[in-house]
Amino acid sequence: MSSALKEFRFIHPQEVAWGDMDALGHVNNTAYFRYIENARLAYFFSLDGIQIMRQHGCGPVLADIHCRFRMPVRHPAHLQIGVRVEEMSSDRLRQIYHLVRQGDGQRVAEAEASVVCVGLSDGRPCPWPDALRQAMQARENPFC
């Protein structure tokens, strides 16, 4: 594992597809947001979080996201995406993502997102289910 990912307890592998590149021959910036979405959902699935939230009638909604692009990526490439919960309140959390190129260990992008737990019936913020909160805290201690 890259030293750029040593602070992450969850790593999501992401393959770069040929179609992710733009006319300039590097991965288009919009693809990074799909990669981060894949990593975010994989994080929740790894904790049975999606199932737990469905049982409680809620789900995660992206409130905002910021990404800093550090260097271009070209196909073929494989990335490793470190995902970490940095802060958590009753109904929202802040996740950090580091996207690292496999092989040379270069950090190609970093992102931060706010995710809100919302009720599926009314779309209003609601508390994270206790089982999921405990699973995230167990994984992330001491971060959140």
Image (cartoon, rainbow, N blue to C red):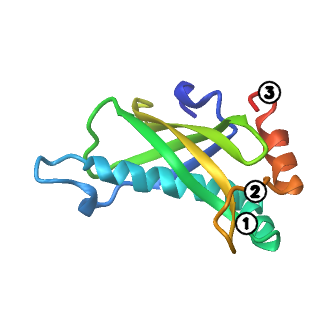
- Badge 3 crowding class, 10 Å Cα cut-off, few under 14, some 14 to 19, many 20 or more, is few
Task: Kindly indicate whether the residue at mark 3 contacts the one at mark 2 (C-beta within 8 angstroms).
Answer: no
- Badge 2 crowding class, 10 Å Cα cut-off, few under 14, some 14 to 19, many 20 or more, is some
Three-letter residue code for mark 3: Pro
Observer-nearest of 78 and 69: 69
Count of labels in the image: 3
Secondary structure at numbered mark 1: strand
Q: Is residue 112 left or right of residue 52?
A: left
Q: Is residue 42 left or right of residue 133?
A: left
Tell me which label, 2 or 3, sits earlier in the chain: 2
Q: Is residue 121 above or below residue 83?
A: below
Secondary structure at numbered mark 3: loop
Residue drawn where x is 53% and y is 42% of the image: 113
Question: Any mark on residue 142, and which?
Answer: 3
User: Would you name the residue on which mark 1 appears?
Assistant: 58
* Placement of the N terminus among the 4 image quadrants: top right
Tell me which label, 1 or 3, sits earlier in the chain: 1
Residue drawn where x is 83% and y is 57% of the image: 129
Tell me which label, 2 or 1, sits earlier in the chain: 1
Residues at marks 2 and 1, CA–CA distance in whole angstroms: 8 Å
